[in-house]
Image (cartoon, rainbow, N blue to C red):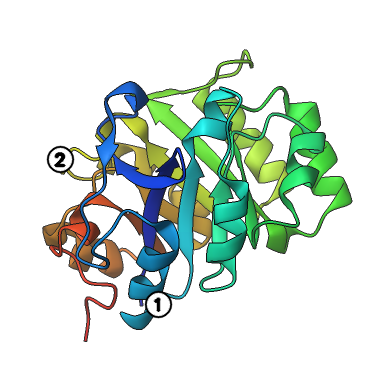
Amino acid sequence: MLEIVPVLDLMNSVAVSGKSGNRETYTPLQTIYASSTNPLEIAKGLKLAGAKEMYIADLDFIERNGKHNVFEVKEVNTILPVIIDIGVDNLKTFEFMLDFAYKIIVATETLESIEELEKIFEKYPKERIIVSVDVKDNKLHTKNMDINLQEFKEVLKRIQPNEIILLDISSVGTGKGYNKALLEEFSDFKDQIILGGGITKDEIDEINELGIKKALVGTALHKGEVKINPFI
């Protein structure tokens, strides 16, 4: 059964929303799960609705703009286990976040090198690590590595993460639907995939029937178009 994992983006200690990863255009989040943009209040509402864990992106930390939201994340983690994206670039950044969240995302967008990814997997249990395959315009999205999607798939086959986020950044917040071609390309990893990027209410049954175990849903969930437990 498909599990819906709520998505929350944090900036300046409050929840925000936006499209296609254009972080400079993000605005305060309006959600049916709380009457404010306070992440703790939203987490409480999500837990009451049946959420088992939640994905948080600390946009300030990712941008390295001198700010962060890690203490808010730590508070939320006492309500719901947090899968956190802080823009991990190396082992040191990964280790910093272990005391603040349940699982730490290592995303291709910010990762320094494959060597740093391997160091993380050598030192820490797979239960604490999620690899995020970030894709933009159908290409692997990475700021620091000279590697394509096919080459990174070979890396994944070698290290065998427990969970792999497959995220089409171009689709985030758009409601245009998930990237079907991308999911097909990663069919070998079906049991490990957490699917994200533009998922709509009409696709939930389809994704469930494909055997995907988890899906990241932000915009459609906060609007009330997709339920935490869509099959009840």
Q: Residue sitting at 29 percent across and 73 percent down?
A: 228
Give how far across and how far down residue 93 sits, in percent: 75, 36
- Residue type at the position of mark 2: Lys
Mark 2 residue element: loop
Residue 200, compared with residue 109, is above or below; it is below
Residue 47: which disc?
Answer: 1
Crowding near pointer 1: few (<14 within 10 Å), some, many (20+)?
Answer: some
Toward the viewer: 95 or 205?
A: 95
Residue 199, compared with residue 138, is above or below; it is below
Give the quarter of the image for residue 108.
top right
Toward the viewer: 81 or 168?
A: 81
Quarter of the image where the N terminus is located: bottom left
Toward the viewer: 158 or 232?
A: 232
Q: Residue sitting at 60 percent across and 30 percent down?
A: 152
- Where does label 2 land, which residue? 176
Of the two numbered discs 2 and 1 in the rendering, the one whose residue sits closer to the viewer:
1
- Residue type at the position of mark 1: Lys
Q: Is residue 28 left or right of residue 192?
A: left
Residue 204: which disc?
Answer: none
Say whether residue 2 is visible: no
Q: Is residue 97 left or right of residue 138?
A: right
